[in-house]
Image (cartoon, grey):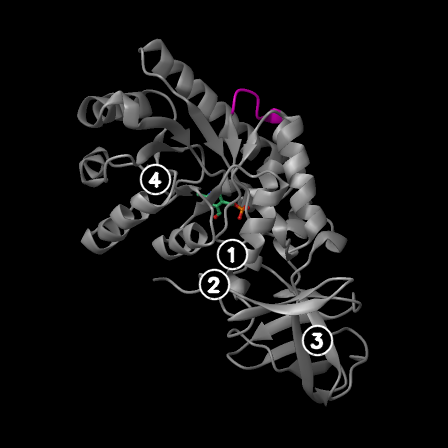
Amino acid sequence: MRERNVRRMQESANSHGLRLRPHAKTHKSAFVALRQMAHGAVGVTAATLQEAEVFAGAGVGDLLIAHPPVGEPKLRRLRALAADVDRLAVAIDTVELAEYLPAGVEILWEVDTGLHRLGTAVGEPTLEAVKRLVANAGADRFRGLMTHGGHAYRATNDAEVVAAAEDESHGLVETASLLRGAGIAVRELSIGSTPTAHHVEVARGVTEMRPGTYVYGDANQVQLGSQALEDCALAVIATVVSTPERARAVIDAGSKALPSDLRVAGLNGYGIVLGHPGLKLDRLSEEHGVLISDGPIGLRVGDRVAIIPAHACTTVNLHPALLVVADSESRWEPVDARGWR
Ligand SMILES: Cc1ncc(COP(=O)(O)O)c(C=O)c1O
């Protein structure tokens, strides 16, 4: 985590009149969640029951699980969690799921504003679904609408990131106005991604945002222009174990230490090698990363390199702990909610 990333995002949310509910799947760490709360977050967003349980255990009293809790094992844990926290909501896009949710758990209905993953389409399809939801579950349980502008990650230039931010906010605001016209109270409009948070000025009418990756930053954000390289806080430290050719070195970090999902156009390899702009992390096998360069590689066996990964959230999930480096002290912090449970 970089403290100033946490502070700046909070200031940005405050100055645009939005509540900040960071997506904590990025860090999966009670320590980081509590720093976000200390800066003014209203609560956190979780993707898994395990994350929600860890953050509740750390004292976060207001949680959103932004993933449909399907199946009895998850519902059983959701019931226990509901008894443990002050405020709990889940995001769903299936009306029938509402009848299985424990009493007191509120519902955010997911709208598809362009990612085409979960959610009903903007406008009439969402109106029809929410009418059924309210009829079945009661108006009190319906908190509002949420969406994730994740299609920003498909952008190839800044104008496309802005367009995704507009889709995200305008799609929710437009749909909420239809719902309100039909007499349905909409208390929350929740958007969220780090690239679209960079263009939060388009989010008029929205009440909450849920960026996650911003705490650490990564090569995806640098490529998209959402964060500067100096704001990236998470690095994987690797050791050069071989220099088999003049323009090639091999490090001891492969796909078990660095993620191999390259989803942003224009990324130059699997990460940014700090202090070595001419190097490209060209290939990952399980235990090996292959660095290449146009000229001499400039590394020797035993050298250490720091790599800013392409994607922070999937990197964190590969590691049991993080070395938190601060001016005053450095210490290990566990990745408390690591895994899928
Ligand atoms: C539902 C939801 N909200 C918020 C986020 C946070 O987005 P980002 O990782 O771009 O900060 C994500 C990320 O996957 C998400 O799935």
Identified at 39% across, 38% down, the residue is 86
Picture quarter with the C terminus:
bottom left
Can you give x and y, in whole percent of width and height, for residue 269 in the image? 63, 65
Q: Earlier in the sequence, mark 2 or mark 3?
A: 3
Which residue is more in the foreground, 236 or 329? 329
Q: Earlier in the sequence, mark 3 or mark 1?
A: 1
Residue 96 sits above or below residue 274 on the image: above
Which residue is more in the foreground, 185 or 83? 83
Q: Which of marks 4 and 1 is nearer the N terminus?
A: 1
Disc number lying in front (4 or 1):
1
> Which residue is under mark 3?
292
Q: Give the range drawn in magenta.
A: 202-206
- Secondary structure under badge 3? strand
> Which residue is under mark 1?
30
Q: How far apart are marks 2 and 3 (CA)?
A: 35 Å
Q: Earlier in the sequence, mark 4 or mark 2?
A: 4
> Which residue is under mark 2?
336
Q: How far apart are marks 4 and 1 (CA)?
A: 20 Å
The disc at residue 243 is none
Disc number lying in front (4 or 2):
2
Q: In which quarter of the image is residue 119?
A: top left
The disc at residue 90 is 4
Q: In this view, does 166 lie to the left or right of 305?
A: left
Q: Mark 4 belongs to which amino acid? A: Val
Q: Mark 3 belongs to which amino acid? A: Ile
Asked if the residue under mark 1 is in contact with the one under mark 2, i.e. CB atoms within 8 Å, the reply is yes
Asked if the residue under mark 2 is in contact with the one under mark 4, i.e. CB atoms within 8 Å, the reply is no
Q: In this view, does 55 lie to the left or right of 49?
A: right
- Secondary structure under badge 4? strand
* Crowdedness near tag 4: few (<14), some (14–19) or many (≥20) residues, C-alpha within 10 Å: many
Q: Quadrant of residue 2?
A: bottom right
Residue 200 sits above or below residue 226 on the image: above
